[in-house]
Amino acid sequence: MKQTYGTWTVKLTVLAIWAALLFAPFLFQDVRSIQVAARICIFIVLVGSYDLLIGYTGIVSFAHTMFFGFGAYGAAILLRQMGPGWTPILLGAGAGAALSLVVAAGIGLLSLRVKAIFFAMITLAAASVALVLASQLSHLTGGEDGITYSAPDLFKPATKLWTDADGRVAQLWGVRMNGKIAAYYFVFCGAALLFWAMLRLVASPFGTVLKAIRENEARAEAIGYRVVAYRTFVFCISAVIASLAGTIYAVWLKYTGPETVLSFDIMIDILLMVVIGGMGTMLGPVIGAVLLVVAQYYLRDLMGAAAEAVSALPLLPDLLNPDRWLLWLGILFILLVYFFPRGIAGTAMQKGTRS
């Protein structure tokens, strides 16, 4: 199939984003920027795995953060009980993925036969139950306070990856080669690997079947595809990928709590990122994750600078008050939806189509 101008533009944009994330520790050397870059990596995977559901099969689920939390809590609990090391991380990742697989298969087999709105409500109820259990099982999950633990020694800031002739931490382009760099590239490589796996999945014949189910479920059923089986399978895959993303995030944060991995606010962010980037593209989630995470971290600062610049003018300083950043974020979202009805990536691909 011939690639359109819009498709190439989106692909080059996504490639540039991944290149910026690859060199983020060297391009943006303050601690906050590295935190933002790591969060973007995690949300690219999380939003991409959700796009497998809503974008490729039309499944609306509100339980995605539940699977994200399973992976995070699996690693967190074992790191606290067994101490820092790779064994608890691997066991926690496996336990979280297995639990996600079982729960997703159960929900899918029991609920995907019903209408979309009822399935969405069932997943919302399941996510609410998981949030309540995480808050109440304090002996296991730490309750509302969450769990604090130590990461493997390789990821500790005091770890020296390279040393100079004097035995001090070596620097590369002004960046100290310590455990913090190792932790970031653990997040980056894990996210890149999972994202590549999702790209391969949607480009495969299986991905073509998912698109067929999304476009016309009755026709897909008529030509012999078992729609419920396919939807359940992709629901399970999406859950496992979200769980693995949660494990990576837990290792990076060294803290896991209900608000960081199970909050409904995270689910809202995922939905916004999918809509902004473009559903059913797998490239859109990259753009949506970058825009929303950067806005959440830097829009207040930008508005503060703008308010200071127009301080001599009437009304504008009040409108640009940093405390109103959520208002402006909502306005930006409305504008994006209006001018990019299929998301940024989807609209760009559609408008770039040549006859």
Image (tube, rainbow, N blue to C red):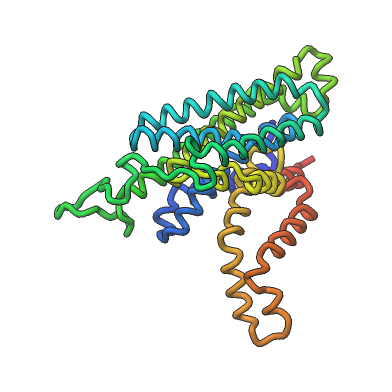
Q: Left of 253 or right of it: where is 127?
A: right
Count the numbered circles shown. 0
Q: What residue is rendered at 71% in x and 17% in y?
A: 229
**Image quarter for residue 353?**
top right
Residue 91 in the image: x percent, y percent? 42, 27
Q: Residue furthest left?
A: 166
Residue at x 74% of width, y 35% of height: 60
Vertical order, 261 against 71 (above or below): below
Q: Quadrant of residue 312?
A: bottom right
Comparing 290 with 248, the one in front is 248
Percent across and percent down for residue 265 are 65, 48
* Near-viewer residue (122 or 299): 122
Along the line of sight, the residue nearer the viewer: 171 or 123: 123
Q: Is residue 324 above or below residue 151?
A: below
Image-based side of 127 in relation to 171, left or right: right
Q: Residue furthest bottom?
A: 312
From what the image shows, is residue 209 above or below residue 17?
above
Residue that appears at 41% across and 46% down: 184
The image quadrant where one finds the C terminus is top right
Residue 174, image quadrant: bottom left
Of 107 and 167, nearer the camera is 107
Work out whether residue 204 can be spotted: yes
Q: Is residue 66 left or right of residue 271?
A: left
Pinpoint residue 49: horizontal percent, then vertical percent.
Answer: 62, 35
Can the viewer see residue 9? Answer: no
> Which residue appears farthest toward the top when viewing the image?
224
Q: Quadrant of the N terminus?
A: top right
Residue drawn where x is 64% and y is 36% of the image: 64
